[in-house]
Amino acid sequence: MSQNQFWNLIGKKLAGEATADEISELEELIKSNPELLYAAQHIEDLWKLNYFENDPGTAYANHLKKLKRKGIPFPENDLSYSNFRSKRVANRVILSASICIAILATILLTTYLLSHHNTNLEKRISTFSTQKASTSRLILPDSSSVVLNAGSKISYNEHFGISNRDINLTGEAFFDVKKNYIPFIIHTNDIQVRALGTAFNVKSYPDDKAIETSLIRGKVEITLEKRPDVKYVLEPDQKLIVRTDSNYEHKKWPPKAPLVVVSTLGHLQDSTVLETSWINNKLIFEDEPFKDIAKKMERWYGMTIVFEDKNVEDEHLTGSFEKENIIQALDALGLTAKFHYIIKSDSITITR
Amino acid sequence: MIAAKSLQFIIEQVALYDDTSAYKELFFTYHSHLLHFSYSITQSKEVSEEVISDIFLQIWIKRKTLTSIQNFHLYLYVSTKNLSINRLKKLKKERTFLLDEVIVEFKSIYYDPEQLMISSEMYKRIVNAIQDLPPRCQMIFKLIKEDRLSYKEVAELLGLSIKTVENQMTIALKKISQAIRFDVRKTISF
């Protein structure tokens, strides 16, 4: 697809010139090329930026002096426009007052509810989980959205969106958090991620040796359960990797690396972000050991994969899957790696 | 920018009732935008301030005829352009105005980058991408984004075809989007 058409349509949309047909066309283009969304989002943010000039009062005063110098009559009157204006101002004042009262009422009501329902906080908890080989999208009560990857689970209590925005996560999820004065905090076993209106990915599977948080937009603050006084702040396109297993070795990990590492997100030649490619139903891996890829494939396809040969396990592979079934995927991998596989009812054994 | 309905109302107030508060509102709304536009042509703040003042002088003197102007928003920009070129010729006799030599300032983008919530590296890349655009392209992008002119109005203002305006916008957005992607791997340890 030529990118020109995409940017042409975005331009028209931002300028308010796009027809309904063009908007539909744009939506279709995004659906079939989700990697463009990243850049498009940033451009839209850029577009919304505003500039407020310092008071042009001086310039105006000079202007009036000029009128006077030239002998042009300029009455100092207060006409109906100003009445229109002060009426608008009055309306605005009444509106602000009613908003204040509404806020005050909400605060009082919430405080009342909280003080009377503290003991019941634990009781009503909502839980969402996915099976293996599936992802699901959901909208939280505060309008934030979550995409859960396979084999993941989130839960939150009934006061979510009212007095807290705490979420418990096992597995992997992509969050798009709506800006809100209540801090959005995700709790996993080892880390806590705090966001303020951002889009990011948290990966914390219990059988993984490391937890990863990848930031796409906005800012997040991460603290370790074990060291709550130390905060790591991520900027967009960075990710934080926390090792949970001190024996974890990875080719790219600096030797004798400490527990926590900040690195940049992987990008492919287009702007697809490696760490969140799963959201668009693509499984992408770059120079990773087969055993790690197998783990991803296990969740992706919902089948167990067992290795009988250590050498095959450690082979490094690069590739991506989208619509392939597991047989096609294994065959594709078999083009570069040397192995055989045996398929049973719900498991696959990999041998030399 | 004032919404179309309110703009119409303000113009009527000035034209029919000599309303000076409405006139002031007009000045306050457009002063900054027209000033920057004029400045990109004259390269002199002093001269541009004069230009804007003269434009509004004419608006006051000819206020009774304001309601007969078809597109007031565009009219302001066309007048500013013509007067600015005129003053430039007087100022620098050897200099003539070429669209390809304007220097465009993107106040809205340079003003408060914190708002964007992006890394300073990426911000620098975006700014460089914009500044690398040909001046004509920058001008078109700015007129649409900051001055809220339509493609048609920009075309008329600069004497270009609508297709050209459309193409330039596409080029600008594409260049900026390329600045948003990169593939450097860096690892920092705590």
Image: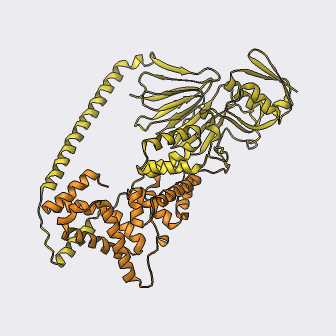
Residue A105 image-quadrant placement? top left
Residue, x 48% and y 63% (percent of image)? B138
| Left or right position of A314 against B138 | right
Q: Is residue A187 visible?
A: no
Measuring from the top left, give residue A56's x and y in whole percent: 29, 64
Q: Indicate the quadrant containing the N terminus of chain A: top left, top right, bottom left or bottom right.
A: top right
Q: Which chain is orange?
A: B
Observer-nearest of A189 and B25: B25
Measuring from the top left, give residue B140's x and y in whole percent: 45, 61
| Left or right position of A352 against A139 | right
Residue, x 68% and y 29% (percent of image)? A208
Observer-nearest of A112 and B184: B184
Q: Indicate the quadrant containing the C terminus of chain A: top left, top right, bottom left or bottom right.
A: top right
Residue B155 image-quadrant placement? bottom left
Residue B15 image-quadrant placement? bottom left
Vertical position of residue B16 compared to residue A142: above or below? below
The colour of chain A is yellow
